[in-house]
Image: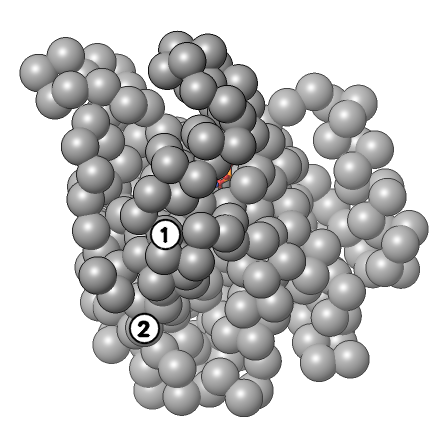
Amino acid sequence: MELEGKNAIVTGSTSGIGLGMAEALAQAGCNIMLNGLGDADEIEETRAKLADETQRNVLFSPANMLEPEQIAEMVATARSELGSVDILVNNAGIQHVAPVEEFPVAKWDAIIGINLSAAFHGIRAAVPHMKNQGSGRIVNLASAHALVASPFKCAYVAAKHGLAGLTKTVALEVAEHHITVNAICPGYVLTPLVEGQIPDTARSRGISEEEVKRDVLLAAQPTKEFVTIEQIGALAVFLCGDAAASITGAILPVDGGWTAQ
Ligand code: NAD
């Protein structure tokens, strides 16, 4: 298997894209440390199912991405329990939509904390270890919003642009240690988070759910199709493999042509 025996942390992997990347990495041979929020029984079910299906060692860290010490502890635990940290995927993220003058300060702080600063804390904790072992892969889940803006998403767009800057800077710092750092920038992906918004938007605009998908969510996405979780998972696996050793500091759109416009 392509990534046989590698050990990977995927933050925010109790649902959506993070879980999809964890599944893809485990199917490619990685042991996994899952992380995220949610119901403890459901998380244990997810963990046990992934371990059972892939016959990999799958652990869970409850680290809150707003707490730097818990992030460092998550990396230390992955090292001691899995044996190393070969791959760090910074994926946890939240969103809030409001005009800038009404944007709740607490939401700004949380979005910058989870979507940007958590990646810094994870990288800061993992890089010394990756340098020691002379290899590593860091994948940051950014967004098309790392490259272009949309109104009413000031904190999210600022955090994702910041994550692109962090990606490029760290890539330069660690390049000679055979560690790569890249950002994946999806357009709209049909995760539970996005799916949950469709009925409400349909009701509030008086249009059908199909119209919400095509004319609202996919208005900027020329393919008029959602990016799939599987496509993001496959790219994450590729970036973590040997064939991607020369791809570093890259900000990679996976957005159906959105940012080509
Ligand atoms: P999601 O809501 O399904 O998953 C988010 C994950 O982050 C969950 O596991 C959640 O528990 C975790 N999380 C949230 N706050 C946390 C905290 N304080 N500590 C630890 N974990 C926390 O969302 P998703 O759509 O799968 O998004 C995953 C990433 O992909 C995010 O960074 C998001 O910005 C990015 N993204 C999503 C889309 C999309 O269309 N869905 C598009 C581009 C980028």
Which mark, residue 134? Answer: none
In this picture, is 209 found above or below 132? Answer: above
Q: Position of residue 171 (x, y in %)?
A: 30, 73
* Distance Cα–Cα, label 1 vs label 2: 21 Å
Q: Nearer the viewer, mark 1 or mark 2?
A: 1
In this picture, is 2 found above or below 91? Answer: below
79 with respect to 29 (left or right): left
Q: Amino acid at mark 2?
A: Ala
Q: Residue at x 22, y 19 (%)?
A: 98
- The answer to whether residue 78 shows anywhere in this view is no
Neighbours of disc 2 within 10 Å: few (<14), some (14-19), many (20+): some
| Residue extending furthest toward the left | 101
Image-quadrant location for residue 74: top right
In this picture, is 5 found above or below 188? Answer: below
23 with respect to 248 (left or right): right
Q: Secondary structure at mark 1?
A: loop
- The answer to whether residue 92 shows anywhere in this view is yes
Q: Position of residue 176 (x, y in %)?
A: 34, 87
Q: Amino acid at mark 1?
A: Gln
Q: Secondary structure at mark 2?
A: loop
Foreground residue among 138 and 104: 104
Q: Residue at x 36, y 68 (%)?
A: 252
Q: Circle 1 sits on which residue?
A: 221
Q: Residue at x 21, y 61 (%)?
A: 261
Quadrant location of the N terminus in the rendered image:
bottom right
